Image: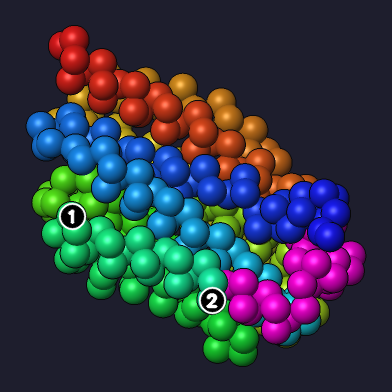
Amino acid sequence: MVKQTDLAKTFVSIRPWSFIMSFNVLITSYVYAYYLGYKIDLVSSILALIGVILLHGAGNWFNDYGDYLRGVDRLGTGTVVYRPHPIVEKIFTPQNLLKANIALIITASLIGLYLAFFFERILVIPLGLAGALAGILYSMPDKGLKYHGLGEILIFITWGVLMSLGGFYAATGSIDPNILLVSAPLGLFITAVLFANNMRDLDHDREAGIKTLANILGRERSRIFYSSLLLGALLITVVEAVIRVLPYLSLLTLLSLPKIYDLIKLSKKPPENFDPETSKVINIYTPILVATLLIDKLFL
């Protein structure tokens, strides 16, 4: 019989706090589609959300798998300190963790096939496959893009392009290029979350012999890059409000600026929980953006 504490550790090891990032991207896609006047299919939207969360979980565990094999994740490193690591904590063997990943991907794939053939959302298949491939390419042992300074690019493409486009399409059956503009700030914020993880682990990653972008840039330039991601996301939002891709009311997302200021100060000495702390700005920005879209659509 599996102990409740083991189940809790397993759940925490998949980093459920990070799922809110995918949730925010999809909810923004759905609400923006509604704002533009598209008809939203509730069932297909919910199924797409479940499929994306499953792929996100698989990506998290595969990242732990790759980092463990590379010797990046070990006792005493930042990631292992603030949450249970599925292999280091002996929740899974490496082989069993890989099997759990495959199970999540298969389940997500079945949802994708259901959407493709029962809801006539055929483009869900290539978009979903691209998302799954991105998760593998990000931290594939030895050859993962994160180990060669290219992880941030892949993260932005995954959340800022594939996920937002896929969510919009799953909900509406249509594709509108404006969703890529609206999702760009979220893509930058989420890239900042992953970059925060690499900033915190800079010394450990160097010892492990891998070259993340933070490792290549060094501490001071990493702080500049991290700040640019956060401030750049807000700047893009302002520009989109001015050119009317977003309503003027979306300028209220500037209320997330105090949190960004705190994070930039925190980046001088990144704490063990720097990545989940960075993700909190998304939980400020997204509800404001979604609320302004709904208010403008319904009342203005």
Which amino acid is tagged 2?
Answer: Ile
The span shown in magenta is 73-101
Q: 296 above or below 27?
A: above
Q: Return the residue found at the far top.
A: 299
Instruction: State yes or no: residue 19 in magenta.
Output: no
Q: In this view, does 164 lie to the left or right of 174?
A: right
Question: From where the camera sits, is residue 261 visible?
Answer: no
Give yes or no for contact between labels 1 and 2 (Cβ–Cβ under 8 Å): no
Can you give x and y, in whole percent of width and height, for residue 261 in the image? 59, 33
Q: In this view, does 8 lie to the left or right of 122?
A: right
Q: Nearer the viewer, residue 248 or 43?
A: 43
Colour scheme: rainbow
Instruction: State yes or no: residue 76 in magenta.
Output: yes
- Residue located 54% across and 72% down the image: 103
**3D distance between C-alphas at marks 1 and 2:** 25 Å
Can you give x and y, in whole percent of width and height, for residue 108 in the image? 42, 64
Badge 1 density bin: few <14, some 14–19, many ≥20, Cα 10 Å:
some
- Residue located 20% across and 25% down the image: 247
Which amino acid is tagged 1?
Answer: Phe
Q: In this view, does 163 lie to the left or right of 16?
A: left
Mark seen at residue 102: 2
Q: Which of 15 and 251 is in front in this view?
A: 15
Badge 2 density bin: few <14, some 14–19, many ≥20, Cα 10 Å:
some
Quadrant for the N terminus, please.
bottom right
Q: Return the residue found at the far bottom.
A: 142
Q: 260 above or below 82?
A: above
- Residue located 75% across and 66% down the image: 86
Quarter holding residue 58: bottom right
User: Which residue matches tag 1?
Assistant: 119
Mark closer to the chain start, 1 or 2: 2
Quarter holding residue 35: top left
Q: Return the residue found at the far right.
A: 76
